[in-house]
Image: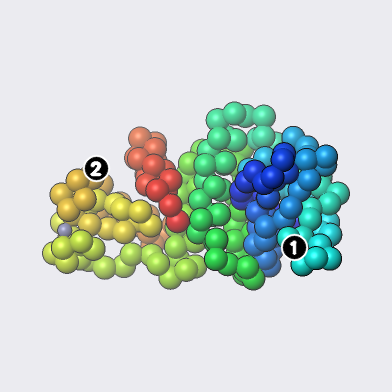
Amino acid sequence: MKGFILNIRKAKNEDVIVTVLSKSIVQKYYRFYGQRHSILQIGNLINFEIQEDNKGFMPRLRKVSHIPFPWIFSNNRLLIWQSFISLFEPHLRDTRAIDSFYFNILLEKANRWHKQNPKRLAIEAYLELLEYEKRLYRSDFCYICNGILENEVGVMRAFIITHPSCIYSKSFNKNEIFRLLSSKSTIEIEDNQIDELFEIVLKGL
Ligand SMILES: [Zn+2]
């Protein structure tokens, strides 16, 4: 199987519990210290086999190998990738069977992570995910006070739109933000705004 490592948690001794997102499942696996390798790093894409535990405990990870991307030696790109992919573990915590959308979108972005500003790719993936989960904001009214939105808007977690004053946030141009929500492309957004939007992405899925 192939999967992205979403989380690594210490278990007893030096063992670890690894949460892996594969095409159709999000699953926690047990990994013994004796088998531990540096390839177990959040965000890595791995190939692995599963060994079921005959006492009904957590399945184990076996024969793990790392499938590298060209950008893994770029510290900056790696850090942005790890902070982005870390958002998936809390989001999918109560999920087991899963649609291939989640694996596919991560794979698609990972394959382009070295070719573009990765923060742009993360924002676009975030928007695609919000649309897939039918959570894209589509109202002309502020989420907080229900008042009509004006030219400047504030942007909350999950790109929920408000008046800037209702959430004490930075102001964004309303038309630009709504174009971003409908196109899911960051092409019209300036780099300094990309940094600000990425900070909102990091608040969570
Ligand atoms: Zn408001």
Quarter of the image with the C terminus in it? bottom left
How much space separates mark 1 and mark 2, taking CA atoms? 48 Å
Regarding residue 48, the answer to whether it shows in the image is no
**Residue 37 percent location from the top left of the image:** 78, 37
In depth, the one of 157 and 94 nearer the eye is 94
In depth, the one of 118 and 38 nearer the eye is 38
Relative horizontal placement of residue 19, taking residue 194 as reference (left or right): right
Give the amino acid type for the residue marked by disc 1 in the picture. Answer: Phe
Q: Quadrant of residue 72?
A: top right
In depth, the one of 184 and 1 nearer the eye is 1
Identify the residue shown where x is 79% and y is 55%.
60
**Residue 179 percent location from the top left of the image:** 34, 57
Q: Mark 1 points at which residue?
A: 57
Quarter, ligand 1: bottom left
Judge whether 112 appears above or below 174 on screen: above
Q: Mark 2 points at which residue?
A: 170
Depth check, mark 1 against mark 2: the one in front is: 1
Badge 1 local density, few (<14 within 10 Å), some, or many (20+)? few
Quarter of the image with the N terminus in it? bottom right
Relative horizontal placement of residue 176, taking residue 59 as reference (left or right): left
**Residue 151 percent location from the top left of the image:** 17, 53
Q: Callout 2: helix, strand or loop?
A: loop
Identify the residue shown where x is 15% and y is 56%.
150
Q: Are marks 1 and 2 in contact (CB under 8 Å)?
A: no
Would you say the beta carbon of the disc 1 residue lies within 8 angstroms of ligand 1?
A: no
Give the amino acid type for the residue marked by disc 2 in the picture. Answer: Lys
**Residue 10 percent location from the top left of the image:** 64, 43
